[in-house]
């Protein structure tokens, strides 16, 4: 990455804000990519942070690149993106062109993106895949190989319209499949590294947990850490238990919310995280009359799933914003909303 400039904290926040804005603006066009790209960015950075040669600026550039790796899909017909079943030749042509379309229409300044990471993220380690080009093995840019591993893991562990018979694999099934792709589609050393990183992360969250557990813990943990870093830049060093020490809460809270909103979070989630980091009272997301009994049970039910705790709620109030990965407050604690189903009422799953 010789010749590339360093990226300061402020620049990174600004550019990541632009990437986020672009991502959010495209949610309707391509809802799958909307969530997928955040997770791919997360996995890519997690992997690269274990590699020699990834200093802070290169990691930051990778995060922005991974977040935008499928940006070109916004220039592909949504019917093609949502199609369940094989694509015809014209549709396939559009799909194969999405890396190049993404680079052409990048919503952030060119210097903050590793273009080759986008261009080659569907190129196989053995030279297969697309686009055309005689580049393979370790000659494929490292950013592309990293994004490819993260991309495949996330695609396998999340629901896809084109995989009707098996909507989502468990993380261990996904890792088995990826070991089979090792040396063909994926860089074998990065697959091994991913395996190790995955196991390490499971340890970190308390045992052999599912990818969802790891993803959930990572996301909540990452956002809280990000909020603490931003807060430190606003008010200097602080005591975790009493960060404000007599300062007026409102302006700090508002500034922190505004900064968090520009990264990964919607307004409500940003406020929940900001309040928690500032040790301010949390605001319950659900009023008692928002909830109604789940069919077949007296009230909200909770259970351990892997190593995270989940609770299922039935909502009476359809106006409540409970979109995926939104941070909410329920019974005085932070939770991630991980799914919702719409029926007579809206049923949501919260995890912590
Ligand atoms: Fe892609």
Image: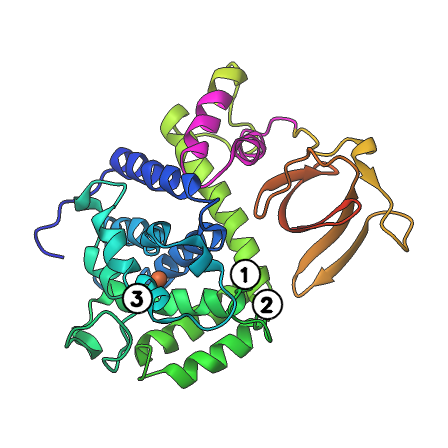
Which contiguous range is marked in magenta? 253-281
- Badge 1 element: helix
- Badge 2 element: loop
- In the depicted view, which residue is nearer to us: 293 or 176? 293
Q: Which residue is drawn at the image coordinates 47% and 64% (left, top)? A: 154
Dominant secondary-structure state across the stretch colored magenta: helix
Report the Cα–Cα distance between label 3 and label 2.
36 Å
Q: Which residue is drawn at the image coordinates 60% and 43% (left, top)? A: 323
Give percent across and percent down for residue 141: 20, 67
Pointer 1 residue: 214
Q: Which residue is drawn at the image coordinates 54% and 61% (left, top)? A: 214
Please tell me in which quarter of the rendered image ligand 1 is found.
bottom left
Please indicate whether residue 232 sits to the left or right of residue 300 in the image: left
Pointer 3 residue: 93
Image quarter of the N terminus? bottom left
Whether residue 268 appears in magenta in the rendering, the answer is yes
Please indicate whether residue 26 sits to the left or right of residue 326 in the image: left
């Amino acid at each position: 990455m010789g010749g590339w400039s360093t990226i300061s904290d402020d620049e990174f926040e600004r550019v990541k804000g632009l990437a986020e804005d672009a991502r959010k603006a495209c949610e309707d066009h391509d809802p799958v990519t909307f969530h997928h790209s955040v997770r791919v960015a997360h996995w890519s950075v997690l992997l690269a942070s274990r590699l020699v040669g990834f200093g802070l600026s290169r990691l930051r550039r990778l995060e922005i690149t991974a977040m935008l790796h499928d940006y070109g899909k916004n220039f592909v017909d949504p019917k093609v993106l949502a199609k369940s079943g094989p694509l015809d030749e014209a549709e396939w042509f559009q799909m194969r062109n999405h890396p190049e379309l993404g680079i052409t229409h990048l919503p952030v300044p060119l210097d903050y993106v590793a273009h080759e990471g986008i261009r080659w993220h569907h190129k196989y380690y053995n030279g297969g895949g697309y686009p055309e080009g005689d580049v393979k093995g370790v000659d494929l840019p490292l950013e592309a190989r990293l994004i490819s591993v993260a991309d495949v893991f996330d695609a396998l562990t999340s629901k896809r319209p084109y995989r009707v018979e098996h909507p989502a694999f468990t993380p261990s099934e996904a890792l088995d499949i990826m070991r089979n792709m090792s040396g063909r589609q994926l860089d074998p050393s990065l697959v091994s590294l991913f395996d190790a990183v995955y196991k390490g992360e499971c340890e970190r969250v308390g045992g052999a947990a599912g990818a969802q557990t790891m993803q959930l813990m990572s996301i909540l943990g990452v956002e809280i850490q990000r909020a603490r870093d931003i807060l430190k830049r606003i008010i200097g060093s602080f005591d975790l238990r009493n960060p404000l020490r007599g300062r007026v809460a409102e302006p700090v809270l508002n500034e922190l919310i505004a900064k968090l909103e520009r990264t990964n979070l919607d307004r409500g989630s940003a406020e929940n995280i900001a309040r928690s980091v500032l040790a301010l009272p949390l605001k319950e997301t659900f009023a008692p009359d928002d909830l109604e009994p789940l069919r077949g049970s007296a009230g909200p039910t909770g259970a351990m799933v892997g190593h995270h705790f989940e609770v299922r709620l039935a909502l009476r109030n359809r106006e409540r914003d409970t979109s995926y990965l939104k941070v909410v407050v329920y019974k005085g604690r932070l939770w991630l909303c991980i799914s919702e189903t719409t029926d007579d009422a809206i049923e949501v799953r919260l995890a912590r």
